Image (cartoon, helix red, strand yellow):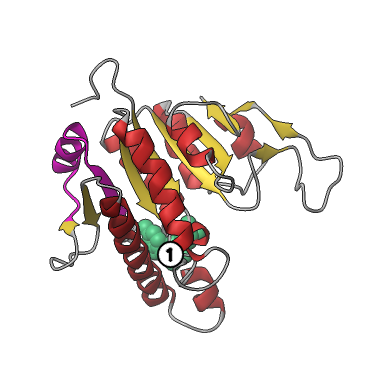
Amino acid sequence: TPAPAGARRVVLKLSGEVFGGGAVGVDPNVVRGMARQIAAVVRRGVQVAVVVGGGNFFRGAELSRAGMDRSRADYMGMLGTVMNCLALQDFLEKEGIDTRVQSAITMAQVAEPYIPRRAIRHLEKGRVVIFGAGAGLPYFSTDTVAAQRALEIHAHTVLMSKNGVDGVYTADPRTDPTARKLDHLTFAEALLQGLRVVDQTAFSLCQENALPMLVFGAEGEDNVARALSGERIGTLITA
Ligand code: UDP
């Protein structure tokens, strides 16, 4: 079921970096702040699903470069995302928001399995759905999963929050002083330029299915709330 006219339904990607506040593990103060922003928007009637990253614990590609088997390392990465999900769930419930965690890897004690139609029902009831364990598939990233989940639950937009950067630039703003922030670009341009701020598979999925993507900075008191509310902060990418 698509979201009814008037109700905004979005998927928010939160990277592991957001949860760790730059360190390994979970920083409760950061997660609390994030939960407050999400809760405020949900109370105003926006349907919010969150796809959670896990880079604050493990990244499969990094462990694999250090000698681990890639698939096993990726499963470790996916399991890390579930810990972030539980942290976000806890702080959202403290804000009085009902939540459900849905995991792509079965873990009945801590999460429901990923069932798209049930996820939609939760959203319609005002619950926040938190998607964990990525796609359940090695060699994928949670950016790609955010695009896929947004398509499957008929979200209007996928919101890619980033740490340390507040949108898409013409070049790497950390190394190139001439880099300019872009307000808008197309997926074709993002793919052609080989932009790495979001992974290319996510761009392709959105391009093929004409799903708008907003890339924005997670830092700041209310950036996440503003993006969830539909403000065009950051960079909008469309087909
Ligand atoms: N991962 C995976 N399949 C997925 C999603 C994630 O194998 O569908 C693994 C992968 O190893 C990845 C790690 O989980 O490095 C953490 O996810 P990601 O890097 O996307 O998190 P983020 O960078 O957003 O914190």
Residue 141 visible in the shown view: no
Relative image position of residue 79 (x, y in whole percent) = 33, 69
Residue 150 versus residue 161: which sits nearer the camera?
A: 161
Q: What residue type is labelled 1?
A: Pro
Label 1 Cα crowd, 10 Å radius (few <14 / some 14-19 / many 20+): some
Q: Residue at x 61, y 36 (%)?
A: 190
Outermost residue to the front: 95
**Mark 1 residue CB less than 8 A from any atom of ligand 1:** no
Outermost residue to the top: 5
Residue 97 visible in the shown view: yes
Q: Which residue is drawn at 40% across and 46% down?
A: 36
Residue 202 versus residue 47: which sits nearer the camera?
A: 47
Residue 215 versus residue 229: which sits nearer the camera?
A: 229
In the rendered structure, which segment of residues is drawn in magenta? 113-131
Image quarter where ligand 1 lies = bottom left
State whether residue 225 is above or below residue 44: below
Would residue 165 be found to the left or right of residue 214 on screen? Answer: right
Relative image position of residue 8 (x, y in whole percent) = 33, 25
Relative image position of residue 49 (x, y in whole percent) = 31, 42
Would residue 239 be found to the left or right of residue 166 on screen? Answer: left
- Circle 1 SS class: helix
Relative image position of residue 126 (x, y in whole percent) = 21, 35
Is 12 one of the magenta-colored residues? no
Q: Which residue is drawn at 33% across and 56% down?
A: 91
State whether residue 92 is above or below residue 49: below
The residue that disc 1 covers is 28
Q: Residue at x 14, y 68 (%)?
A: 109
Q: How many labels does the image show?
A: 1
Is 128 one of the magenta-colored residues? yes
